[in-house]
Image (spheres, rainbow, N blue to C red):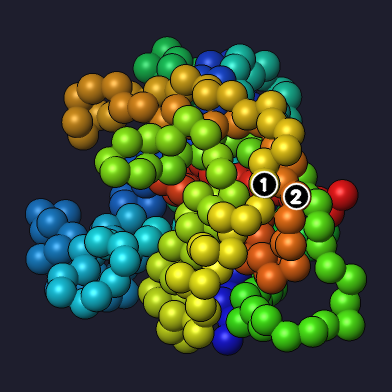
Amino acid sequence: MSLSLLNLTCHCRWTSTARLPDYAGSTLRGAFGWALKRCSCMLKSQECPDCILRGNCPYAFLFATERYENTGNSVNARPHPLVIQPGEDCEGDGREGAAFSFSFLLIGRASDFTPHIVHSINLMGKAGIGAWTKRGGGRFALETVTDGERAVFDAATGLLDQPTAREISVEAPTNGATTEARTKRIGIRLITPLRLKQENKLRADLPFSTLIRAVLRRVAALENAYGPGEPALDYAGLIQGAKSVRLVESSLRWRELQRYSKRQEQHVSLSGLMGEAVYEGDLTEFMPLLRYASQVNIGKQSLFGLGKITFEEL
């Protein structure tokens, strides 16, 4: 079983002074959503759920995710097949002429809409992003788009090459003997706020079993929606086994973060856990899950780039 992923990195340059929040994921999502809808929506008066064209519409596929009803899924709606990740140079004040970047992770057939995405980024640049757009600020030019080391779009030529997707999979763990070295200690890093809920409350700690539960939820949701179906994993056994893994070091902290929702006309929290933690125990069977998680983000609001996680064996 495998899932198709495509990473596109947009290399841009400010053409006017910009002001972005300290974390620009929600700003990029709002500007990109506006631009994508503008270039792809054919029936302006129709709402996405009632539109006859929604099956082939880039905006509907990426953003108007339908809710599940009586299907037995552990999630209540189709997950977004998109993760928007701001670059480290895409925050705060942007100086005219300075370079910056941001990335898109496209999941499953979302990669089919690459031309629409590139065109939408050009529209974003002309309209501007951030706090100063009404004064002509936040304008930028898209220069290149890469799918790794290779440029798939160059503004100088205006040509778009076919990007190359990759496939990831999560192997079903086994309880038998293995010739591979056992993993006994790992360090994880939460690069962007991780938001996990338990009993409808956000957790401010991260036991290993809570982390694995979130990864399994993400795996099941993505594979059901965009892959070959839910993988044959021993979910209960994995969660039970994860309870024996100990948290031995932690610099995890709660980061307060907010965005303003125009639709809700109020500030919405994006706060979550960030920092590093070290776990010890028999971790071998969890390594495929952690490799998967490090490529797709986990937790709530992954669309905005939240829940980005990396790990290393120690």
Camera sees residue 290: yes
Q: Which residue is tagged 2? A: 280
Q: Would you say 51 lies left or right of 210 here?
A: left
Q: Nearer the viewer, residue 34 or 223?
A: 223
Report the disc number at residue 246.
1
Check the image and report above or below for 103 versus 111.
above
Residue type (three-letter) at the residue carrying disc 2: Glu
Q: Nearer the viewer, residue 253 or 61?
A: 253
The quadrant the N terminus occupies is bottom right
Q: Residue at x 43, y 43 (%)?
A: 196
Residue type (three-letter) at the residue carrying disc 1: Arg
Q: Position of residue 22 (x, y in %)?
A: 56, 20
Q: Position of residue 70 (x, y in %)?
A: 15, 74
Secondary-structure class at tag 2? strand
Q: Position of residue 303 (x, y in %)?
A: 45, 48
Q: Are marks 2 and 1 in contact (CB under 8 Å)?
A: yes
Check the image and report above or below for 237 versus 228.
above
Q: Residue at x 75, y 67 (%)?
A: 284
Report the disc number at residue 72.
none
Q: Residues within 10 Å of mark 2 (few under 14, many from 20)?
A: some
Q: Residues within 10 Å of mark 1 (few under 14, many from 20)?
A: some
